[in-house]
Amino acid sequence: MCVTDQARSEHVNQNDQCCKNPLLDPFKCQITIKNDLKMSTTTLDPVERLLDNAEQGNSIIKNPNVLRHDYIPERILHRDKQQELVTQSLIPLYKKSIPPNLLVYGKPGTGKTLLAKAVAGKAGVPFFSLSGSDFVEMFVGVGASRVRDMFEQGKKHSPCIIFIDEIDAVGRSRGAGLGGGNDEREQTLNQLLVEMDGFGGDTGIIILAATNRPDVLDSALLRPGRFDRQISIDRPDVKGREEIFKVHLGPIKVSENLDVHKLAEQTPGFAGADIANVCNEAALIAARKGKTGVEMKDFQDAIDRVIGGLEKKNKIISKEEKEVIAYHEAGHAICGWFLEHAYPLLKVTIVPRGTAALGYAQYTPKEQYLYTIEQLTDQMCMTLGGRAAEQIFFGKISTGASNDLQQITKMAYSMVTTYGMNEKIGNVSFYDPSQENTFQKPFSEETGKIIDEEVRKMIDAAYHRTLDLLTLRKGEVEKLAKELLDKEVLHKSDVEALIGMRPYEEEKVVTFDVEESKSEETKTEE
């Protein structure tokens, strides 16, 4: 029988039990030791006893301090701080005060609704999902009534989260409707504004909204107090696309030689939905061919299908037209090959795809956000390479460059009117997002004439530069065009075998993890 100190003994007597294992008791115990010679009572501390055993090498517990009631391991010393932060963030919700609402905006397919689904799974509170169109109705007063009902339901289940998808359907700027300020949509918006921040505002409700048109939302809806936080979800970069690929490749059987990083490099500008579509298409292509795993070739075919559309090899094209297409695409490829700031060539093909594309050259755009005049000029020259090749080899031009001309015209006008990259116009920008859909121009007629003249001069200079380049590289264009007529599809390695290596080195975008870099620094210091 063991007997503790006075406080412990009273507790044991009240519960009619005693500590069965003194080693697990954090308190000191008096243990009666019986032997053949005498009866003695010895006071032992379990921790000290374990320490003694540890010194003798008999203990199975390396750290006896784990038995102390106040012991906290060093690796989780920060848990108290974490718990404190979490508690502080949840206090507003539990106190039923209005916490900050959240607006998520970004381009289609970037994962706004998916983020809301993740929040719904992790929130631990009631989650209501609605669409902006659920409030839009022809009959007067129905939309406002539905807003009131929504907040009444939220109040009953408070605290809760209400998610409104595509909020631009109900949150457009007021004053643009046909009914003045009394149309149904504006009444619905007014009621939403009052419920979110008014005298009768319901408490304990978080509004989570998503839209891909934040520019059309009413300013009263976006002010602090209604949507306190606005998060932009942009298209992923190379590192982000690689991680998204790994997620969508999980349920797919892939080959061992699949390079996920290369796939991420070949899909610039792809959102999460596009990457999911590519993975699905690649799996279908591999299944049709009876493969046991999806290979790199299947993914490349899937990327081509997503970008250009379905292959149409049965499309009847005359020999003369096919030759023009081959020289056109060869002109694009050679310009991109020998221009310093052009994108690196990935593939060139004359296989018809989609409804209009008779051939195309695919490049790997760099992950960059700032462009110089030299870079934009090289891009224009590369785009004009097809038209220039037709002029050099056939002495006439075709309608195949219509899309190219649209791109360079848009680029040239942006350089002159938006980016201030023209000496005559000067450092002036006429771009106004609010006046984008209006017919009123922010400059005079004389300035408009000067802009048109400067744009034409810029495009003509780029075209003559392209003509000079392709005239100098006429042999390479002809060699590449004949190979295209023979094989129809040429990759970067094929072009290198034909005309040699690209004279300009391709700069790789360096991506690294912060944690990895820190660990490497610590290793070097050691």
Image (tube, rainbow, N blue to C red):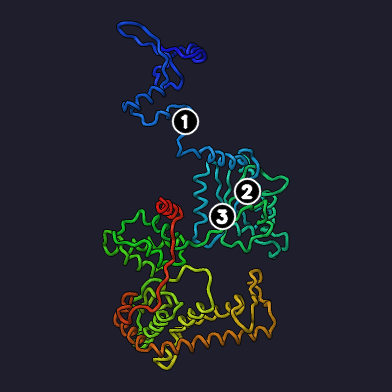
Measuring 54% from the left and 81% from the top, which residue is drawn there? 409
Q: In the image, is residue 389 above or below residue 88?
A: below
Q: Residues within 10 Å of mark 1 (few under 14, many from 20)?
A: few
Q: In the shown orientation, is residue 35 left or right of residue 47?
A: left
Q: Secondary structure at mark 2?
A: loop
Q: Secondary structure at mark 1?
A: loop
- Mark in the foreground, 1 or 3: 1
Q: Of the two numbered discs 2 and 1 on the same chain, state the one appearing first in sequence.
A: 1
* Three-letter amino acid code of the residue under disc 2: Pro
Circle 2 residue: 100
Measuring 60% from the left and 61% from the top, which residue is drawn there? 214
Q: Quadrant of residue 419?
A: bottom right
Q: Of the two numbered discs 3 and 2 on the same chain, state the one appearing first in sequence.
A: 2
* Three-letter amino acid code of the residue under disc 3: Asp
Circle 1 residue: 71
Q: In the shown orientation, is residue 256 left or right of residue 154?
A: left
Q: Quadrant of residue 281?
A: bottom left
Spot occupied by residue 275 in the image (x, y as percentages of width and height)? 42, 61
Circle 3 residue: 165
- Mark in the foreground, 2 or 1: 1
Spot occupied by residue 282 in the image (x, y as percentages of width and height)? 35, 63
Structural distance between the alpha carbons of marks 3 and 2: 18 Å
Q: In the shown orientation, is residue 307 left or right of residue 256?
A: right
Structural distance between the alpha carbons of marks 1 and 3: 48 Å
Q: Of the two numbered discs 1 and 3 on the same chain, state the one appearing first in sequence.
A: 1
* Label 2–label 1 contact, CB within 8 A: no
